[in-house]
Image (spheres, helix red, strand yellow):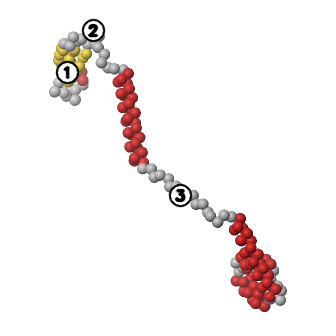
């Protein structure tokens, strides 16, 4: 009977043998003491190698903290943007009102005209055929009304 090779013993230790090889190795080990001592030596060497490798590594494993991304509520972002845009527009408008005041005095030759339509406004007629009231305010504050038909 031929003895087991070192490769087959290593495959048997690692659990890489198929069913036929496993049966052959078990039967042979019951009859051959030298192969059984080889198997014990290989197992001891494998255990020594694993222990040597384990001693090189640290036993503590640092697990970094799990950082979950913030769930962004899209509707809330849209509302925030709208609020920012509205506040920006209000600031620009306020800035323009402060820089360019509108309460300028009327010059002597300026006349203000206000026009409005009579109550009997007909939407089917062109604007040139509508009855209008034109109010003219001169610089002294006198109001003159004109009726245009």
- Circle 3: is it few (<14), some (14-19), or many (20+) Cα within 10 Å? few
Pick whichever of labels 3 and 2 is earlier in the sequence.
3
Screen quadrant of the N terminus: bottom right
Give the residue drawn at x 64%, y 66%: 59
For disc 3, the marked residue is 66
Q: Residue 108 bears which disc, if any? A: 2
Instruction: State the residue lying farthest toward the left.
Output: 120
| Distance from Cα at disc 1 to Cα at disc 3 | 74 Å
For disc 1, the marked residue is 132
Give the residue drawn at x 38%, y 43%: 79
Q: Secondary structure at mark 1?
A: strand
Residue 147 found in image quarter: top left
Q: Which residue is nearer to you in this view: 20 or 98?
A: 98
Mark 3 or 2: in front is 3
Instruction: State the residue lying farthest toward the top.
Output: 108
Give the residue drawn at x 53%, y 57%: 66
| Distance from Cα at disc 1 to Cα at disc 2 | 27 Å
């Amino acid at each position: 009977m031929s003895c087991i090779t070192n490769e087959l013993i290593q495959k048997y230790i690692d659990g890489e043998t198929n069913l036929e090889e496993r049966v052959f190795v078990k039967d042979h080990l019951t009859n051959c003491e030298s192969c059984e001592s080889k198997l014990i030596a290989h197992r001891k060497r494998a255990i020594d190698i694993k222990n040597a490798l384990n001693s090189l590594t640290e036993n503590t494993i640092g697990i970094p903290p799990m950082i979950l991304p913030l769930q962004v509520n899209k509707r809330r972002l849209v509302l925030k943007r709208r609020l920012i845009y509205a506040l920006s527009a209000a600031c620009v408008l306020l800035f323009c009102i402060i820089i360019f005041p509108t309460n300028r005095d009327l010059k002597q030759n300026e006349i203000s005209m206000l026009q409005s339509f009579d109550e009997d406004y007909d939407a089917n007629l062109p604007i040139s055929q509508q009855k209008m009231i034109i109010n003219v305010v001169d610089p002294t504050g006198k109001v003159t009304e004109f009726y245009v038909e």
